[in-house]
Structure formats: C-alpha cells, structure tokens
C-alpha cells in the first residue's frame, strides 16, 4: 500500500518537470510509477527477466538523455515507446524461437495479416507505423484496445480477457476478426504503396 | 514485409494513439481489474460461505398451493476475494473454423436453454446473444465458450453501455462452456477450499468483490467510485456456468441463478 500511496503523489507533469530540472529523483519517480508496466512490456517481448531489467534501465537512460529537450505530452506512452524499441533492439529472434517466446506467437499471428502481394514489399518501420496508426483509428475503442494490448504490449489472451472483464473466447474471436480486417486493409493499401 | 516487420514496426505508431488506447481513457472494468491486481489484496482463499439456502416448493407441503422456490438471502455469507489466476492459454490453431450458433443450436449442444427464466427489470439482452461463435477443428468442437449479455443498454458494437451515475455497466453476463477455459473472476486455485451452497440439486459457489470505476483523478489516481460485483459459478451435466453481475444487488443475482437452475420464474428471495 505504501508503494501505491507514493505512486499517487507524483503525476506525469511533475515527473517531466523533474527531468527538466535535471533532478535525479525523476528516474526514481518514473520507476515507482511506471516501472512495473515497463518491465512487463519488456518481458513480454524478451521473455527474460534479466534482459527486461536491462531494457528498462536503458529506457530510463534514454528518457534522461532526451527530456529535455523533449517534453512528452503523455509520459507513459513516451516511455513505453522507448522501451519497446529497446526491447526489439535486444531481441534475439533465434533464441526466442528456441524458447518459444511470446513474440514468436505474435509474429505468427501477424504473418496471417500480410497479403501475398505485400510479402515482397520492403517497408520502413515508419511507414508501417503510419499504416497501423490509420488502421487502428478505424477500429472501435474496444477493438483498438484489444489489438494494441495484444500486439503492442504483447499481453497474453488471458491477461487481456481479465483486464477487459471478458472471456478468452471473446478476445480470441475479436482478435481474429481484427487480423482479418488488417489483412484487407493492407491489401487495399498495397496498391498505393 | 513479414510478421516480424509488422510487429517491430508497431513501435513507430503515434504516441497519442498508444496513450489513448493504453493509458488515458481506459474503461472502468479494465481499470478496476488492473487496480485490484495491483493492490495485491490477495485474500487467503476464495472463501465463499454460502449457507442455509432453503428450498421450498419442490415437495407437496401444505403451505404452498403454487410451487415456489424460496431463498433466504440473510443466510448467504460472502467473503471478498481477489487473486491472480494461473493463466490457461488456449491456443487457437489457424485452421480452426468459425461457426455461429443461435439459441436453439446452443440449447441442443449444452442440453438446456441458456436464457435465464428471470431477467431483472430494466435489463435487455444483447443483440449478439443469438449469434455465438464456436470454433471447430477437424469437425470437432474446439472452443465452445459462449457468453450471453443482459444489461441495461448496449452500444452499436454490442458492448454494454455504462450507466449515467457510474462509468460501468449494469446487468449480468452468463458464460457457459464445456471445454475448460479460464476463471475470469473466481481467481481461485484448485487447492482453495471453496464453500458451496446447494440450489436445487446444484452446488453453487458465490463470490463478491468491490469494483472501482473511473474516471480516475489525474493526480491522486483515485477512482470515481466503486460498486458491488457478484459471481456465481456451478456445473450442470458437465457444463460450466458462470454468472457475473455488475451494479446489481445480490438478491437479484441469486434470483437469476435460481431461475436458471430450477427453470422457474417462481423464485422468492427474502
């Protein structure tokens, strides 16, 4: 409970101010408020506690180096984004394959969404990001949340079901439909790419 | 482009999109569950003591001309529960075939009509209740979890609407399945000694938890309020049933459950 109370004391703006003041308490406050979620994200991708810890530390360092001059409007998303980049930088795909990491399952699911015609196309990460931004904005709020929890955060079906208060079948069904929509969307967009 | 590119490329998505979907406007239910987990209020066990449920009306007692099932609510003893479950990850193979079942098909499969006889006043059923998705693998049923929603209103996408006075839905969901899935709310392990009560010939486990709802205060992160969530789980003829009620009093859930088990509208909860 003490931990939670402390978390309540500090809001995003106050943490960002600490970074701008070059106050090292900024990192400690970030850890208190977002440490668990960052660690979970990293662990979902890396499938290793130790790698996840290092990834989160890299995230704090990057945040310290970039704020200022950056003034994130949503610190949570800013940190999560850094953490996700760091996690994929560290990811050893071959090792993940051997250990049957969650990321392999997610990759397999997303592979279903790639239209045959798009397999040969080479897209830059930013182009993919833009495509997906447009796609998820078309989804209803609930579907958007499910999709991003699954593929951006790397959460398990059971976790998502628990967090949205629905059965696993509901989540699976919706994700299946979203993937089908994504495939259709990429097919449509494939003409323009 | 391949699945790896797509997965990794998601990191480039706009921060606002991520923030909106994952942190900002989180629905009450999601926030509530996460907060409860974070709080770590792990009860020693899910100790649902439901005792003294008396059944009348099945015999030929002189007191009743009309068969009626009577439940003594005062004898129902609920204990708070909260516990992380062991995730049961169900893999859905790519070659699963999706099928939509209506009320009759569900009744044929589960061996009874899934619509409770008693529905509390003000609740309506989801337009999707009659279109349940089942997955088959090699002709056999692979995933058979179905859920029927009865709430005070629904959005266009079938999700229950929130009430005006609380950012949460009001009503209940019945989930039924034969193939084992997760226990969404009854986060109990197999070792927990659950106390059960008997309604009709069926052992029922009742659970309770306080559920917070948003919006959450930006600075203090305090919820806007909390409401009562009740759960009732049981099995009939190898089918699992779980009722979860939101913003409904306990007696209404007991009445719904009794009407479902005993298949009668003549239920009195006192």
Image (cartoon, rainbow, N blue to C red):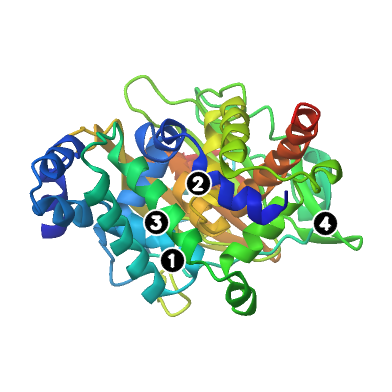
Q: Could you confirm whether marks 4 and 2 are on the same chain?
A: yes
Q: Residue at x 19, y 56 (%)?
A: A32
Tell me the mark number nearer the camera, choosing from 3 and 4: 4
Splitting the image into 4 quarters, where does residue B157 fall?
Answer: top right
The residue pinned by badge 2 equals: B11
Q: Earlier in the sequence, mark 4 or mark 2?
A: 2
In percent of width and height, residue B202 lies at 57, 62
* Total numbered labels placed on residues in the image: 4
Specify the subunit that label 4 lies on. B
Determine whether, in the image, residue B105 is placed left or right of residue B64. right
Specify the subunit that label 2 lies on. B
Vertical placement of residue B193 versus A103, above or below: below
The residue pinned by badge 3 equals: B207
Q: Nearer the viewer, residue A19 or B103?
A: A19
Q: CA distance from mark 3 to mark 2?
A: 40 Å
Q: Residue at x 21, y 33 (%)?
A: B218
Q: For numbered disc 3, what is the local secondary structure?
A: strand
Return the mark for residue B96: 4
The residue pinned by badge 1 equals: A43
Tell me the mark number nearer the camera, choosing from 3 and 1: 1
């Amino acid at each position: 409970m003490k931990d939670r109370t402390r978390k309540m004391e500090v809001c995003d703006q106050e943490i960002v101010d600490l970074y701008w003041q070059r106050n090292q308490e900024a990192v400690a406050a970030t850890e208190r408020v977002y440490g668990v979620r960052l660690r979970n994200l990293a662990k979902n991708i890396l499938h290793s506690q130790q790698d996840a810890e290092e990834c989160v530390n890299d995230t704090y360092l990057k945040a310290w180096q970039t704020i200022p001059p950056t003034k994130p409007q949503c610190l949570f998303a800013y940190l999560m984004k850094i953490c996700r980049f760091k996690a994929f930088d560290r990811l050893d795909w071959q090792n993940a394959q051997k250990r049957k990491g969650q990321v392999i399952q997610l990759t397999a699911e997303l592979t279903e969404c790639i239209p045959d015609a798009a397999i040969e196309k080479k897209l830059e990460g930013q182009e993919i990001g833009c495509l997906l931004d447009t796609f998820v904005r078309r989804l209803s709020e609930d579907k958007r949340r499910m999709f991003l929890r699954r593929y951006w955060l790397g959460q398990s079906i059971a976790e998502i079901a628990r967090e949205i208060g629905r059965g696993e079948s509901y989540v699976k069904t919706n994700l299946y439909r979203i993937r089908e929509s994504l495939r259709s969307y990429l097919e449509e967009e494939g003409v323009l790419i | 482009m391949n699945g790896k590119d797509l997965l990794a490329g998601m990191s480039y998505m706009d921060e606002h999109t991520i923030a909106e979907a994952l942190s900002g406007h989180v629905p009450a239910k999601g926030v509530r569950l996460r907060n409860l987990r974070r709080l770590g209020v792990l009860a020693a066990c899910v100790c649902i003591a439901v005792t003294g449920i008396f059944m009348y009306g099945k015999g030929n007692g002189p007191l009743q001309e009309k068969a009626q099932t009577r439940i003594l609510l005062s004898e129902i003893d609920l204990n708070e529960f909260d516990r992380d479950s062991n995730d049961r990850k169900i893999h859905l193979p790519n070659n699963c075939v999706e099928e939509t079942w209506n009320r009759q098909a569900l009744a044929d499969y589960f061996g009874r009509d899934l619509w409770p006889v008693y529905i509390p006043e003000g609740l309506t059923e989801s337009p999707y209740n009659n279109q349940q998705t089942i997955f088959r693998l090699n002709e056999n049923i692979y995933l058979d979890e179905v859920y029927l929603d009865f709430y005070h209103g629904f959005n266009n996408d079938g999700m229950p609407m929130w009430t005006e006075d609380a950012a949460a839905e009001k009503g209940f969901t019945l989930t039924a399945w034969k193939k084992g899935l997760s226990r969404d709310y009854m986060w109990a392990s197999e070792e927990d000694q659950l106390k059960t009560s008997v309604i009709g010939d069926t052992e029922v486990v009742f659970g309770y938890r306080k559920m917070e709802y948003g919006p959450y205060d930006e600075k203090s992160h305090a919820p806007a309020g909390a409401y009562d969530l009740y759960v009732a789980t049981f099995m009939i003829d190898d089918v699992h049933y779980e009722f979860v009620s939101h913003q409904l009093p306990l007696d209404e859930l007991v009445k719904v459950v009794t009407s479902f088990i005993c298949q009668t509208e003549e239920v009195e909860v006192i």
